[in-house]
Image (spheres, grey):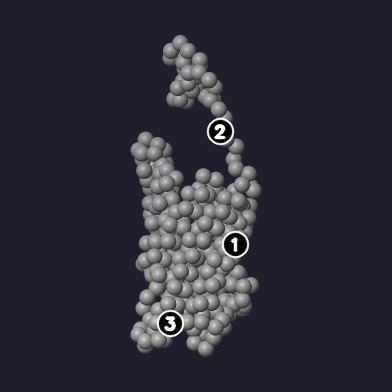
Amino acid sequence: MESLLNDEPGRVVVNTHVLDSHAEPLSSPPPAPSVSRRLAAEFLGTFVMMVFGIGVDCQTIFSKAGSCAYALETGAPQVSSDGGELSINLCWGAGVFFGVMIAGGVTGAHLNPAVSVTMALRKELEWSMVLPYFFAQFLGAFVASAVMFLNYSPAMYHYARKCCDGTDSPFYDGCREDTAHAWTSFPQRYESVGYGFADQLIGTAILLGGISAIIDAKQRRPHPPAGPFTVAASVGALVVAIGMSMGYNAGYPINPARDFGPRVFCWMAGWGDFVFKAGDMWWWVPIVAPLLGGPLGSLTYWSFVEVWLPQDAP
């Protein structure tokens, strides 16, 4: 039962919170966002993240067309591109930042089924919302793929004419893997499915371990929890760091929706079942491995750090 203490006329202390009995009553907390609003936020946040990510991949790959043409004319090596690994990593990080800023106030900005599953295991998301979130995230990635396909189709065909041997189509042998790689992931030719699975497991574990630390309010005591901008910037920087350190083997998808949505779009847009057969049937790895790696990373953080932090505010 709450204890009440009258310590001064006109003032009441309720559980150490001092209220002025002559002041206007405090407004009730806002209602929880509806399911439709939560799904819309996940869709839009994922869409924005993917527009930046797919856009920088398309620009980096397809801008090589000018270098290819020059190489054919002069015999010089093909070297130039309007982008590179650094711009890819930075732009993906920026996409994550803006996606988190958009959806963070409504859902916490999962933008990734591995995050949703991990939050459900941490009892911070209802299990009944995991599949709806996954669908909204998948749809956001799919629609972003379609928008970037519309935006970059002329550049893609120009790239096929200038850089692909024996074909003017971006969908045929000698070109299709390079062009599809602007949308979805494929492992390096030396990378087996087993090592690729480990790559995605480790990358997503680092992602969710880092996110668990970023959102852990106990880490910042006695200061307030991290604000929305700080969380978004920190998660974006984390993605940049993962890309710079672990992007070579398979392009660090570390997100089932980020990989599967564009892969399904590529299958429908002209690449066909190649996107599911390539890399020794690689397509399932960026789905299953992150769903296991995310909880593993969060559990590791909880076991080594979070469980030892004081549970009550000092």
Residue indicated by mark 1: 143
The residue that appears at 64% across and 48% down in the rendered structure is 36
Q: Residue 53: horizontal and vertical position, in percent?
A: 48, 63
Q: Is residue 93 visible?
A: yes
SS class of the residue under badge 1?
helix
Which sits earlier in the primary sequence, circle 2 or circle 3? Answer: 2
SS class of the residue under badge 2?
loop
- The quadrant holding residue 224 is top left
Residue indicated by mark 3: 69
Which sits earlier in the primary sequence, circle 2 or circle 1? Answer: 2
Q: Nearer the viewer, mark 1 or mark 3?
A: 3
Outermost top residue: 9
Residue indicated by mark 2: 29
Q: Residue 59: horizontal and vertical position, in percent?
A: 46, 69
**Residue type at the position of mark 1:** Val
The residue that appears at 45% across and 25% down in the rendered structure is 17
Query: Which image quarter holds the N terminus?
Result: top right
Quote the CA–CA distance across marks 2 and 1.
Answer: 35 Å
Is residue 84 placed above or below 29 in the rendered structure? below
Q: Residues within 10 Å of mark 1 (few under 14, many from 20)?
A: many
Of residue 161 and residue 259, the one placed in the foreground of this image is 161
Q: Residues within 10 Å of mark 2 (few under 14, many from 20)?
A: few
- The quadrant holding residue 287 is bottom right
The residue that appears at 42% across and 81% down in the rendered structure is 68
Query: Which image quarter holds the C terminus?
Result: top left
